[in-house]
Image (cartoon, helix red, strand yellow):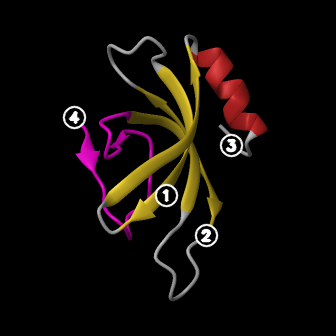
Amino acid sequence: MTTTYTMGDTLQVGSQLMNGAIVVACTKIIERDPGEVRAVWVAVCIRSGEYHPFVVWNVVATPEGFFAHLGDYYHHVIEAIGRFQDRGGSL
């Protein structure tokens, strides 16, 4: 089971993004400053039924939910984890 999160919640493994992808690893790379509306994570996500099922995105907390952008797409999770770590992620 997955849950859709909205701003103010923490992105975590199992979170579902607004595009339906599921987070399998994530690291916060930008903290939310007081008065700001966004925090940013780097995340490895899985998308069922896609040609490239693994993707590394920057994920931004918005009032509508978690928004993914700046993606790198992969066939294999090992490749995605390598890119995730290159972008500042840690397991």
Whole-angstrom CA distance, mark 1 to mark 2, is 11 Å
Dot 1 alpha-carbon crowd within 10 angstroms: few under 14, some 14 to 19, many 20 or more: many
Residue identifier under label 2:
31
Quarter-of-image position of residue 51: top left
Would you say the residues marked 3 and 1 are in contact, meaning their CB atoms lie under 8 Å apart?
Answer: no
Of pointers 1 and 4, the one earlier in the residue sequence: 4
Magenta residue check for 14? yes
Q: Which residue ends up furthest to the left in the rendered image? A: 1
What predominant SS class does the magenta segment belong to? loop
Magenta segment range? Answer: 1-21
The answer to the question of whether label 4 and label 3 lie on touching residues, with beta carbons closer than 8 A, is no
- Residue at horizontal 37 percent and vertical 39 percent from the top: 14
- Which of pointers 1 and 2 indicates the residue nearer the eye? 1
Q: Which of pointers 4 and 2 lies earlier in the amino acid sequence?
A: 4
Give, as a three-letter code, the residue at label 2. Answer: Glu
**Helix, strand, or loop for circle 3?**
loop
Q: Residues within 10 Å of mark 3 (few under 14, many from 20)?
A: many
The disc at residue 89 is 3
Q: Residues under labels 3 and 1: Cα distance?
A: 15 Å
The type of residue carrying mark 3 is Gly
Q: Is residue 53 above or below residue 15?
A: above
Q: Which tag, 3 or 2, sits closer to the chain's start?
A: 2
The label number, if any, that marks residue 60 in the structure image? 1
**Residue 60, percent from left and from top:** 49, 58
In percent of width and height, residue 76 lies at: 58, 12
Q: Are marks 4 and 2 in contact (CB under 8 Å)?
A: no
First-in-chain label (3 vs 1): 1
For the residues labelled 1 and 4, the Cα–Cα distance comes to: 22 Å
